[in-house]
Image (cartoon, helix red, strand yellow):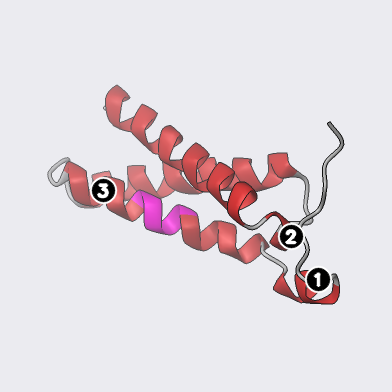
Amino acid sequence: MLVETVAYVLIGLAVGAGALVLLPEYFPAPRVLTVATAVVAALLAGLVSRYALDGHGTGLSIAVSAVCSGLLVSVLARPDLAARSGGHRRHRPA
C-alpha cells in the first residue's frame, strides 16, 4: 500500500508539473495550486479505485489515478485568458 501511495503522489507531481511546463499560459493560478490539485486528485482517485477493486488490479488503479488527476487539473485551465494574450508564453525572470 505504501508503494502505491508513493506512485500516486509521483503521478500527481508529474501531471501537475507537466501541465505547467507544456501549457503555462493556460494556468494563471499559482503554481502550487495546480500541482497540489494534481497530487490530491491522484491520491484520492488512486485510493478510491484501489478500494473499489479490492486491492486487485494495481495497474488499473494507477491508470485511473493518472486520468482523474489530469481531468481535475484541466478544470483549472483558462484557455480564454491564453487566447487574449495571443498564446505567447510568459517569460519568467532568470
Residues at discs 1 and 2 in contact (Cβ within 8 Å)? yes
Q: Earlier in the sequence, mark 3 or mark 1?
A: 3
Q: Nearer the viewer, residue 39 or 31?
A: 31
Mark 2 or 3: in front is: 2
The three-letter code of the residue at mark 1 reads Leu
Which residue is rendered at x = 39% and y = 58% of the image? 67
- Which residue carries the number 3 mark? 61
Residue 14 position, x and y percent, is: 48, 41
**Residue 76 percent across, percent down from the top left:** 67, 61
Q: Earlier in the sequence, mark 1 or mark 2?
A: 2
Q: Give the extent of the magenta segment.
A: 65-69
Quarter occupied by the C terminus: top right
Q: Which residue is mark 1?
A: 81
Please report whichever mark, 2 or 3, sits nearer to the chain's N-terminal start.
2
Q: Which mark is residue 25?
A: 2
Mark 2: amino acid: Glu
Q: Nearer the viewer, residue 60 or 77?
A: 77
Residue drawn at the location 79% of the way across and 56% of the way down? 28
Q: Secondary structure at mark 2?
A: helix
Q: CA distance from mark 2 to mark 3?
A: 31 Å
Q: Crowding near pointer 3: few (<14 within 10 Å), some, many (20+)?
A: many
